[in-house]
Each structure stands twice: as C-alpha cells, then as structure tokens.
Amino acid sequence: MAGSAHAAGIGSGGGPSEVVLVVQIVLLLSLGRLLGEAMLRVGQPAVMGQLLAGLLLGPSFLGAVWPEAQHWLFPPGRDQRALLDGIAQLGILLLLLMTGMETDLALVRKVRRAAVSVSITGVAVPFACGFLLGWFLPEAMLPHPELRLVTALFLGTALAISSVKIVAMVVREMNFLRRNVGQVIVASAIIDDTIGWVIIAVIFSLARAGTIDPWEVGRSLAGTLIFLGASLTVGRRLVFWLIRWANDSLKSEAAVITAILVLMGVLALVTQAIGVHTVLGAFVAGLLVGQSPILTRRIDEQLRGVVTALFAPIFFGLAGLSADLTILRDPRLLLLTLGLIAVASLGKFAGAFAGGLIGGLRRPESLALACGMNARGSTEVIVASIGLGMGALSQDLFTMIVAMALITTLAMPPMLRWALHRLPLEGEEKERLEREAAEETGFVARLERLLVAADDGAKGRFAARIAGLVAGSRGMPVTVVRLGTPTEEAVLSGAVAAAAEGARGEETGPVEVTEHARPEPAAEAVGEEAAKGYDLLIVGISPTVAPEGGLTDAVAGAAERFDGPLAIAAARGAHRDDPDAALRILAVIDGTQAARRGAEIAVTLARGASAPLSLLFLADGGGAGRRLAGMRQGDAAALREVVDLAERAGLRVRTHVRATRSPEREILRQARAGDHDLIVMGVTRRAGEAASFGPLAETVLEASDRSVLFLAS
C-alpha cells in the first residue's frame, strides 16, 4: 500500500495526486449512490446515504478497521485534501442555490401568520438552548476558548435551523405538501433557513473580527439588510432580465445555466465583500432564480442533474469523512452527544409546538408541525462544515453535530407520518386541495411564457387581449411580434397589459410585455422568435381565412413555424369594431383531451374577463340527450370534469348536451341562440399538416359570424 501511495505521488515529498482525487470521487459517487438508493427504499432521504458513505470511508469505520487503506485513499496531507475541498466548497454554493430555488415565497405569504409564529419560537427556543450549551461547555471542547461567544452563537444556530430540503421532501412524499399543516411546516422551514443563513453570515463576520466590535457587527447587519432588500426588489427584475437575455440572445448550449452560475458567484462575492459568508449570496441567487416567471422547470432540471449526481455526493461524503464517530467511545463525549441531541430535539419540538398554538393551529396540527421541524439533515451538515472551516467548531463538536443531524433526520419521517395520519381531510381544506390538484395538472398551469404574432388590425388587438387574459391569470411574461410596417405606437403590448391587469389575481405578479416590430413575413418572424422557447403561440392576423377556404398563407406560415400549442383568434361581430367589447363565451367540448384544453382556456378567459360561460357538449350516439343522466358514462365524466373546473374558478356555467350528425351546424346554432360572441374550441393538428385542424374546425371558422378561438395541440 505504501508503494502504491509513493507511485501515486503521495507521501513524503509528494504533492497532491490527480489519480487519488479521481479514486476519491469515484468511491464517494458510487458508494453514495448505492447507500442513497438504500435510504430511499426505507423511506429516508438520499443525502443520508451520501453522508453514511463518507462515514464508512472515513476514520469512523474504514480508518478503524484498516487504517492503512483509509490513509492511502484519503491522505491526511493538506494539499491532497484541498483538491476535494475545492469541489466541496463549490458544492456548498450550488446546494444553497438549489435550496433557494426550492424556496416558495408565495407559500410563506399565504400562511405567514402561523409560519412566522412557528419560526420565531422554533428558532428562539433551540437557539437559546444551544447558546447556553456552548457557553457552559468545557474549554477543552472549544477550538478557541477566547472566542467562546462565537462558538456559543454558532452552536445555537446549529440547533435552531431546520433542513427545508429534507422537510419538503418528506412532506411531499407523503402527499401532505398542500395540506394546511404541510404548508405551514414547509413555510416555517423556509423562514428558519433564511434566518439561519443570515445569522451565520453575521457570526462569520464576528469570527473574522476576533472580538465584538459593535461598529463591525452593525456594518455587517446593515450590509446584510441592504443586500436582502435590494435583491428582493430591484434584483428580482434584473435576474428575470438576465435569464431572458441569456435565453434569447445567446446561441450556445446551456447559456442560461452559465448565466445563473455567474450570478451565483457574483452575489456570493458581494456578500463576502460586505463581511458576511458567501452562502448567503448563493441562497439569495437561488431565491431570485426560483421567482423567475420563465424557464424555471428547464433550469431546475438541468441544474439538479449535475448537483445531485456530482456535487452533493462529494460534499456530504466529505462531511462524513471529516467526522470521526470513534470519539463516541469516550463515555463523556457520548453523553455530551446524547445531551446535544436531546437539547436540540426538545428545544425545537417545544418551540415549534408553542408557535403552532400561538399561530392558531389546533393541537394535533401543532404536534405534526413540531415533529416535522426537527429534521436537520443536509442543512445542518452544511452549517457544521462552515463552522469547522471558520474555526468556530472543534473537530469533536463538528462530529457531535453531524451525529445529531443524522439521528434527527432519520427519526423525523416516521414521527411525521405518525402525526400526519392523525389529521383527517375535511371541509374547506378538502375543497381547496381538489381545486389546486385540478389546476396544477391542467394545461394553463404548465404555461410559463406566451408569444403573440399579430398585426395592428382588429384581429391582432383581439389576439393581444386574449393573450393578456391568459397571462394575467398566472403572471406569465408575453412577447408580441407585431407584423407589418413598424410604428412608434405600442398598441398590441398595451392591449396585452390592460387585459392582464384586469385578470390578475391577489397573488399574481404583474405581466412583463415585450413588443418587437417585424416587417418580414409572419412565418420568418415567428420562426426566429419561437426558437427562444415559448409554451403557447397566439395568432391574430387579418385576414384569417383564405378566399378559397382554409387559413391564409400568413396564418398558416406562422402556425407551421411553431412546434408547440397554438391559438388562432379571429375577431368577428362586435369584436371587429371593438376588440375590447364584452365577452360571452361558448366552449365546445366532446370528451377529447384537445377539447379539454380548449375548455380550460375558455374558463381562464371567462374568469379573467368576468364573462358568462356556456358549455356545449357534442355527445356520441343517436338521439338528443339534454341531461347528464341521459349520457354515456365517459361523456358524462368528461363534461362533469369541465363543469367542476369552472365552478372551482368561481364561475356559474350553463351546459348544453347535443348528439348530432352535423356538429358544425349545432355549434353555430347554439352560438346564435345563446347570443354568444366568442366560440372556443380545442382542436388537433392533423398529422403532417401543422396548419390544418380538420373539416369541423375549418367550417366553423369560415361560416361563423361570431369571434372564434381555436386552441390547437
């Protein structure tokens, strides 16, 4: 083994070895993955397996049974360890970036009363316990006895903070994320995390100063508050602009991910410059990226892959390597560790339980909350690693905290499952969950960014209005490609903004509207813009119908250059003279998935415009059924699904069921009989013909004297 070490360049006179680094990475990745899989199969988070991998490869196990092999694999020399440390430090920033992206500030606002009370008591009680424990620790346990205050503050923070990642994962796996108590648990963990990183940043400043300098502490606090305030106001818009600019302007692969990583590094350097730790900058960068209204799913998928596969196993494995559980053979240290676990658990449990009661939760809900908040997990390991690196924690204290994080995290899932299963689902909460489940699995909920291709005519302004109503429902950004001769007036973007403002909900942010004047043909203009990534194209071009029937070349060209769902708007009747005229909507459905998406768009428009909505169901089979009881089971279920969707949106709908061999006549007849001025239909693109939607859609489009909106997918 010694010869191998010498051959690898390790040992006396040898520098760091890339070969050994690769061996270390391979071992940590493979063993961390296998143990992570094992943890998942027994209902535990995968990061616990990665931490166990480090413990098994470190002095706690391999070093105890085969010290020569352990020393060769992980040499004690500073130079070799620095290679792995560099990867782990980048891993900390990336983990905090991902944690920030998973932080749902809208959720915090929704349950703020209970979440704030739980966070205040849930942080204050264990923080006080940890501070007192650190204050009375024997000097032998302190890395720097003269900085006892720093160690006590850090120990208090370590006991107070919860792992939002672990908490959210367990609550989500149990299908309790949207339950009232589940939202409070996750929101409280988010606030805990945020408070914890701010405190750690200030402690870092204090540790660096070496003494309590009121001016230095005040400067750090003021700098932190200014940084947070600027980031969450001006910074939010700047980050959205950066993501959109990188996506729309840069042609190279993964340009948005590069921009986000640069942003993370810049904010980390800013926080370092104001005297606080880089982790706060990375966490805030994640917060801002997570609030971006576009590309969030794509960004999350691309970043999560590299962080989960590479950086997380190395970081948590290195944390396990740094811990030496063999110290627990000392009865005194074992008792101190058990005491630390008891103080941390009881303090967190008591604080969270009291906060729940103060926040208006029932006793069973407060009990579940207290069980859920006790998981330290990955966050605690990150905190302990920072404390060890800055000299606030000794090696023994670091090991004790890692053991505490491991045990509290392993104990949390079964305790939370036991507590949550005692909470029945009923009343308003049951109705809300059913509504949210339907919305989140729907078509509109998956839209993030809209593209409008329109001219300055009535059809273009009507299409812009439609886009604004859809975008306003969820705060989606809209890009308008205005076709024709460029003018200085932003008529279309103004129509989008006005409609979106009227459709905004209480928790929906303002809609960003960008308008580009493009004189080239519609197909060319749409094709170039569509390459930037959009979820829905809305076309409003005059004329819509060609003299010989079917779509005009401009409309067909725009449709053919867009691969995703598209909507074609044709303003007729009152909307030809006034695109902002009142809407009375008729949604046509027939049980297909395409028709279901069209009905969802109709519901969104009706809710945003406060317009009446009627449903026309074209049933299969002979006879004219006019009641749900007279329909086939599948048809009745399809209609009931749409009716429920509308009612959950606060709409009262009228339903008409028809079985006819001339559906186009029935649609036009019902539109006239009900005095509807907008017909909404979900249609399917015909195979090989991107701009063809079948004879029924074409007949309605050509013959209708009312406005028509097709949603093609």
Image (cartoon, rainbow, N blue to C red):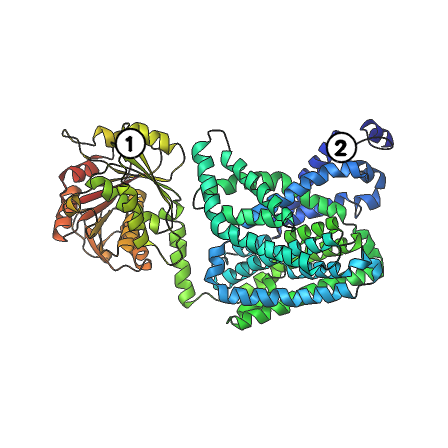
Comparing 376 with 204, the one in front is: 204
Residue type pointed to by label 2: Val
Which residue is at the front of the view, 672 or 269?
Answer: 269
Frontmost of labels 2 and 1 is: 1
The quadrant the N terminus occupies is top right
Q: Position of residue 556 (x, y in %)?
A: 25, 30
Residue annotated with mark 2: 20
Dividing the picture into quarters, in which one does residue 366 lie? bottom right
Quadrant of image for the C terminus: top left
Label 2 vs label 1: CA separation? 57 Å
Task: Give coordinates of residue 159: x percent, y percent.
Answer: 68, 61
Relative to 29, is 673 on the left or the right? left
Compared across the picture, whether 644 is left or right of 656 comes to right
Position of residue 579 relative to residue 8, above or below, is below
Residue under numbered circle 1? 558
Neighbour class for label 2 at 10 Å: few (<14), some, many (≥20)?
some
Q: Is residue 445 above or below residue 116?
A: above
